[in-house]
Amino acid sequence: MSQNSQSSQNSTYVRTAEDVQKVIEHAKLSVDNLRPNVQNIYFGEKFENYKLLELDEHILSDLKCGSTVVFKGDRKESAVLCTETKTYDVKEAETSNSILLLPELTFPDEESSNTELSSRKVVGIFHTYYEVKSCKPRLKKLRNLLEKCSYKGSELEHTVLETNEMFTFEHLSAIIQASDVQLKNALLDMGAFQINGYWRVLDFEYECRALSFLLNLIDDQSWPYNTIPVDETFKILGELLPTVILQHILDQYSTCCVSSNLSETHRSLIEDKVCKFMAVGLLRPCDKFNLSDFKIAWQGSVPEGMTTSLKQLNGTVLVDESSHPQTICYFNEHDLPDDVMDRMQYLFQVREKWTLDEIRPFLENLSTDKLSVNSLLAKYARASKVDGVRYYSAKHSSK
Amino acid sequence: MILVKLIDNECSSPSSIPEWAAIEVQGELESRHHTPFERQYVGDLFATIKDNVPILIIGHHILYGKMQTFDKPLAVMKKTEEAEASSYIVQAIITKKLLFKNRPKPIIANVNKIV
């Protein structure tokens, strides 16, 4: 499309009513059919370096409330946009059309009493804009960062502090591609806690040790696992564990006693959490465990009165029922790639065929309201039936 | 990390973001002698009384368009560098545009009166 060259080199050319009259005639338009307010479009004196960002209602209302939204991501990461609660994937979208930006323009449906010419300025021409799509927060980095500086006990704390970077919430919020609400939830989910304002996780071996102090004490004192006196626990274990750690272990693995007269003074261990931790403790050091041996050892490791069940280990283990004898191994969902394609590829490398129940715990965290585990599988895997059982395998045979 | 926020203006209520408009045309705009765009005249925008059809005349081309609301509004952001932190300031929101998606039609003018 070529632009009128009438202005030639003259940058101060201004449209007159006569010019407009002429153009209406040439175009064979009838003045009677046109609204009287004609707008003459000019380019502005200077094109600012604007960027266009697509907004959904949520982002728009956040901005209108005066909230700040944030682009996050370093050079190696693709950018996300975070509001207080949500995370969006940001992609630069291209259009072959030209989008002209005008601070002032009267739309045809707007009433205007103006019968004079009005001049309008184009302040920029765009062929791209940032597109946003709601996505999952990217949290893999968070676990990696916190595990690097994990708490390993008071005697090693000095070295850990000296050789590692420590992270406050503000610091994490700046470098983790998640909204603040999502980041807070992720920290709680992974059992992180604060020591002197820095977010930490317990080193796995240290946590094993700390929890077994507690379990041994319960065993020694013959306390029922759902009625643990808090004061006495602190008094006895206070010599072995720093208060902040003991408090954290209690927060993680117990709740207030249900019985109202004990709720202030006693705690009750959370069966599923304790059982799961003990199972991981047994499985993590070795490649594979004979399944029936494991079940016996596991039940023996938990406090009296608790019942272990493989259901407690959803998303943490792989059971191989086809091998003889049957085996179980440690396989944690949070060690898997965050990207759907990468994760599928990885899962089908580990095991060629999965039933829905087997694979579900490893995909659940990637599913969204719009994309269930079933639709993820329909999209990224191939289904087949063997003896009436439906299996999922890789869509493309791996190279 | 780059912050995106509205213009800092304590006196105006935060919900009053200026509304700008967009005109979307097919393809590229070119000036005939590849002179810079700045300050140049582009064209005339009309609207019909009946049905509110926007009409844009650029050079010897006439374009019939329509009004459209963006499914997702666009924020117009300007980058500012303050100290070491850069941020985007939202200058305006665009919710409506005039879309000229059809190919422009040439205007056959009287021979002696070429604009």
Image (cartoon, rainbow, N blue to C red):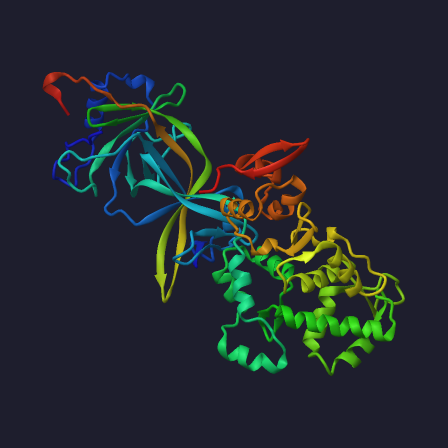
Residue A283, position in %: x, y?
67, 61
Q: Quadrant of the C terminus of chain A?
A: top left
Q: Where is residue B47 in the image (x, y as percent from the top left)?
A: 34, 25
Picture quadrant of residue A208: bottom right
Res A397 visible: yes
Q: Where is residue A300 in the image (x, y as percent from the top left)?
A: 80, 64
Q: Nearer the viewer, residue A126 or A195?
A: A195
Residue at 53% of width from left, 57% of height from top? A140
Residue at the front extreme of this rendering: A324
The correct choice, above or below, for A339 with respect to A99 in the image is below
Nearer to me, B10 or A102: A102
How many numbered marks appear?
0
Name the residue nearer the viewer: A202 or A398.
A398
Relative to A198, say whether A21 is above or below.
Answer: above
Is residue B16 at all visible to an observer of this figure? no
Residue A214, above or below A394: below
Horizontally, residue B15 falls left or right of residue A217, namely left
x then y, percent, for residue A48: 29, 49
Q: Which residue is drawn at 82% across and 72% down?
A: A218
Q: Quadrant of residue B106?
A: top left
Left or right of A192, for residue A75: left
Q: In which quarter of the image is the N terminus of chain A?
A: top left
Residue farthest along the left direction in this orientation: B112
Give whichever of A168, B67 is nearer the camera: A168
